[in-house]
Image: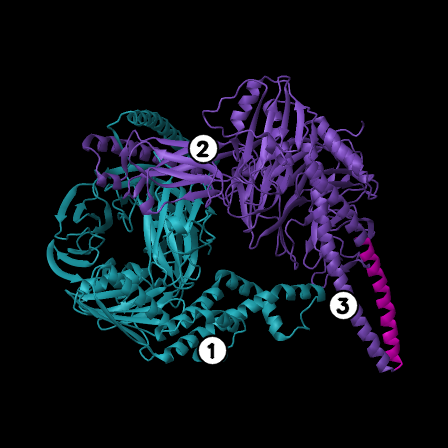
Chain colours: A purple, B cyan
Amino acid sequence: MLLPVFTLKLRHKISPRMVAVGRYDGTHTCLAAATQAGKVFIHNPHARSQRLNVSRLLQSPLDSDVSLLNINQAVSCLTAGILNPELGYDSLLVGTQTNLLAYDVYNNSDLFYREVTDGANAIVLGTLGDIPSPLAIIGGNCALQGFDHEGNDLFWTVTGDNVHSLALCDFDGDGKKELLVGSEDFDIRVFKEDEIVAEMAETETITSLCPMYGSRFGYALSNGTVGVYDKTARYWRIKSKNHAMSIHAYDLNSDGVRELITGWSNGKVDARNDRTGEVIFKDNFSSAVAGVVEGDYRMDGHIQLICCSVDGEVRGYLPGGAEMKGNLMDTSVEQDLIRELSQKKQNLLLELRNYEENSKQAESSSPLNESDGQRGIIPANTKLQTALSVNLGSDSQAAHVELRISTSNDTIIRAVLIFAEGIFTGESHVVHPSVQNLSSCIRIPIAPPKDVPVDLHMKTFVGYRNSTQFHVFELTRQLPRFAMYALSNPDPAKEPLSFVNFTVNERVQRVVMWLNQNFLLPEDSEIQNAPFQVCFTSLRNAGHLFIKIKPSGEITVSTDDIDLAGDIIQSMASFFAIEDLQVEADFPVYFEELRKVLIKVDEYHSVHQKLSADMADHSNLIRSLLVRAEDARLMRDMKTMKKRYVELYDLNKDLLNGYKIRCNNHTELLGNLKAVNQAIQRAGRLRVGKPKNQVVSACRDAIRSNNLNMLFRIMRVGTASS
Amino acid sequence: MELTLNRSDYLQVGVTSQKTMKLLPASGRRATQKVVVGDQDGVVTCFGIKKGEVMPVFKTLPGLKIARLELGGALNTPQEKIFVATGSEIRGFTKRGKQFLSFETNLTESIKAMHISGSDLFLCASYIYNHYCDCKDQHYYLSGDKINDVICLPVEKLPCIIPILACQDRVLRVLQGSDMMYEVEVPGPPTVLALHNGNGGESGEDLLFGTSDGKLGIIQITASNPVHKWEMRNEKKRGGILCVDYFDIVGDGVKDLLVGRDDGMVEVYSFDAVNEPVLRFDQPLSESVTSIQGGCVGKDGYDEIVLTTYSGWITGLTTEPVQKESGPGEELKINQEMQNKIASLRSDLEHLQFKVIQEREKYQQSSQSSTAISAVPSFSVNDKFTLNKDDASYSLILEVQTAIDNVMVQSDVPIDLLDVDKNSAVVSFSSADTESNENFLLATYRCQANTTRLELKIRSIEGQYGTLQAYVTPRIQPKTCQVRQYQIKPLSLHQRTHFIDHDRPMNTLTLTGQFSFAEVHSWVVFCLPEVPEKAPAGECVTFYFQNTFLDTQLESTYRKGEGVFKSDNISTISILKDVLSKEATKRKINLNIAYEISEVSVNHTLKLIHPKLEYQLLLAKKVQLIDALKELQVHEGNTDFLIPEYRCILEEADRLQEEYKKQPAHLERLYGMITDLFIDKFKFKGTNVKTKVPLLLEILDSYDQNALITFFDAA
């Protein structure tokens, strides 16, 4: 059994995920973590004598080894590491919703303090691609920004949604690090500098990412899933009812390969094999785990795994030695193996018994009757049929995709359990008709909120009306990506104004195959030769989608939904294995909205500046009022003093009001900035490969130079130069 | 001294019932004992362990499920005859496996509990107790509620035979001949009885009981009255007691108490100088522990605890250390033994796998034929649905012999599913369709690998009744699922008790009409939990109940043609009135319902609620302050400047938070009950006060007892 090599109880709470280990003076290892009330504490157990007694860093009154750093804002991310290689020691980086602070703990000075309008939800420190200096990369609202030690922003790009996790990992094995970004739209994107090289769709918000070994990395989702990817292939994943608070890679059993260490919300810490997900070690804290990091905390030359709980308990572990043979838990491997084999044997025996009993029953029994049904006997040739179709809905029911499940005889379906991720509120959907509504056929409405292909794992309980035991039929069907679009009659009048235009070198049959695979087409629909056009109606908002194909291979997709156009292009690109695709696009309505948003952003920016100036004025006024009031008090002029204090009170009220306005303004600004970032991302998604990256960087330049016409031009044709 | 025990699994038999495994006394030169176990396939297996390998002694043919297995023999000789209860039959085997007795009892039901003492045989079916001597019927007793266990005080020490029945209605019934001497109330439904120290203590009258809610206690059963010695509450919220034994595993010369629980917990208690139990060892296993006994099985010279689990594993927790201190050669040998074992298992598996694939194909082929049927035998589900007194919620425990794949829970009444720490399954709630299909709750529990036991917690609302269904699908081919139903009764939060306070102001509901005793009993069964389904003997019967949430009480007395229900809680009476009239209308029985409402009772109930409400409000307030106070503490470094009240909150912060977490929505439930009380009070007066409920909630928000009482009086 592996035991902690040290245990500490700090008397400070630790905010989840906000833990970092660093050598802020170059030699002594310290633990920094965010705590309550916008503070960051630094636990330094080594240098007791040298006290950092300076304004920003206060010594904690609770613990003599702990210093407190006041941020005065809720800390949203924190890390430590070498930002300036010339300094020779680690810097502490603290991000909030509005700012990023790079702090030199040793000299008690700011390296830089930058305003970041997109907020900093996640931070990672290290070198990215070919950029020579280490960067502090922050992820905020749809945006990624990288700063060097002087605060210059050397890296900027946008991504699909709010960023929740970041990691640096050599994804393609070229010796340079790529940036992994996990965001709220359930995607893990891999950026090779500002080019997206891979996208993996997950089933929930990605809350943590960590590099493991080579191109392998671990991830955690907000629904309690953790797993490991190697490049774009997932090795394994497990789901727990608890949430993974923090993940980290560490070689705990000294076998040369790092394991995935997960800290859970129920206080459990476990280490899992990177290939199989098998648990090789676990331990328990009394409260939720806040962070898992590593560092030489005892300064004895060995790197320990350090786990911290939200209540301030810190435990350090050293890898198990050779004598433990990688067996870190309190059990004997042989005993476990025997138990597992016996269990398998027992299961097989049971299965065998099931078949024996079954054939015995089959021989003895006469035709079926009701009492047989109760015992769970059904005709052996009972089959289950499933069909997916589009239901256009009625007055009482919105349009949806209909899943029809029926049995081939008089048996009834007692209940259907569908396990599918991302399309129901939970991970499953249950249909359980009341006794009087039981029948051999069930229709289940499904309305996937996003256009993603989903596997529906169905478990159907088949039996008779009075059965207490049912047969479980397990089936899997795939819901096509664009299931929520119904084929309709082309009506030129309804053709949307917006369109995308591109050319593919594919035979028409291949395009038809793509259509068949990604849409729910009625069985009798024949698609003629090129040129042809198909028209779909969205079941969500009744919007129209036209796809026209000319014999030359030119395809026009007309839809007002820019996201849908992007999805279609990405889906086609992967189906036809297209690497680069330049697209001509026009979305007049959307572009007009974007123009308005951009104007609004300018307005909010100017309001923001004005408010800041007002605030500075007010604080000057307060200072002088206070001095005057105190003067009056010293001179025993109570009347004036009272007057001054009343004025001060009013001014304070004004300040508070101003603050509220500032807050509102800020949230509005954030919302609009997100819209802008998303627009760039969407424009990028209309293209594939190189053109995609060109669009993103060109858009960004256009926004920097505030050239709106240029921006729209780029979005339309894909390049800046005419 | 620290007690360390190492687990080693010996053998797996079929699913086992409670108390079906015994160790045969050691005989001859050999110090190791043999294990005899009976399973639900009806097989009795006897085996010993030689050099770490299982050496079978005998195995009988399958038959009816074995409910109990006991050892017996002439008094004062080694007890080495094996008796098993299967169906309504008792079979006797010698230790070599020769059947010497087959005794078909005259019981119509199957035997549930058995005790053997010399030539006396004590048997219990669900409600019936029978005493045989040399297989001749001696005495008979019909119990008021289900009998869970039977025992008889040691006949060597006492002048007469005193059998004791452990009954579901929370009493031990002490008999003499065919008559009951007296009843002893115990704190929970007793599930197991044992003689203290294995012999009943010095007097031979000390009896240990364990309850289904995890409590233990010792009662001295004297000739005239019971003396409670000690009782151990279930502070850690562990499972119910299924089996106990006395054995000196610590090795200090005093017998220790070994306990097996239905949540898989194995515990060892030692007794200190004043004979109070002290927990020495506990180890969780993953499934119910059905039998437990101390002895020496695996290796000569090392004592161990032998236990069986629900799915039929026979496991030893031995004092033998895992790491051998002897030379390196020996360790190698042990490894060799293990390797052999694994190799033989693997070859078994391969053989089986082949056979299974063949059978699977055959099964697949049968699906082509139009006349063939597919019948899969039912698997056994061990379930328990009980009301917890502490937080007035139900816990549902499901246990299957193989790993569970998923459990789907459906209910046609509004209930809340609460999170249970122990359960690791991923829960997912499905949107409920109340209108067309009467589903108020639809949820799936997807279990992690190797989960054989699942615990759910359910909160019900009194007055809303219906059925909760659990569809259990185990991980075995061909896949089947079994449905289990559980009734949520109208007065679901009531619990049987044996004493009530007669001085409280009571509201009375009287039913008269043309109905039989059985009919009125069935209504009571329908409305209230913990009432035996069989109508009790006699003409008139009285049951007492207690509301576990509010501590109000209910007395129900009924006979043919008349039923009287008295409660100090007007809501209880209101629910009963609604349900009973509905039931009677359904069966087309003409009922006269009369009620007598006591105005004072409302204020009395409010006073009962008051301390609970006040406590909860204070707790909520304190918990709210904790974070802010902690921040102040961090900022200032000490707490000297705080008023003592706040300092006290800080000191108790952890305890307060834990308590607050333990009873979620407690305040809302109290508010709900006060609102019901308010509506019901005026319903009996014939006025509808639903419009005034918002006003009441306002008063509750700024709670003051007097204001509330005034509001109740004034409205």
Residue B171 colored in magenta in the image: no
Assign a secondary structure to mark 1.
helix
State left or right for residue A472 relative to residue A529. Answer: left
Q: Residue under circle 2?
A: A388
Label 2 neighbour load within 10 Å: few <14, some 14-19, many 20+ = many
Instruction: Determine the chain carrying the residue at label 2.
Output: A
Instruction: Determine the chain carrying the residue at label 3.
Output: A
Viewer-side residue, A459 vs B685? B685
Number of residue marks: 3
Viewer-side residue, B153 vs B211? B211
Amino acid at the residue labelled 2: Leu
Q: Position of residue A33 (x, y in %)?
A: 69, 52
Q: Residue under circle 3?
A: A653
Residue B131 lies, with reference to residue B713, above or below; the image says above
Q: Residue at x 72, y 37 (%)?
A: A680
- Real-space CA distance between mark 2 and mark 1, rounded to the nearest whole angstrom: 59 Å
Assign a secondary structure to mark 3.
helix
- Real-space CA distance between mark 3 and mark 1, rounded to the nearest whole angstrom: 40 Å
Q: Position of residue A4 (x, y in %)?
A: 59, 48
Residue A239 lies, with reference to residue B142, above or below; the image says above
Q: Residue under circle 1?
A: B711
Viewer-side residue, B679 vs A321? B679
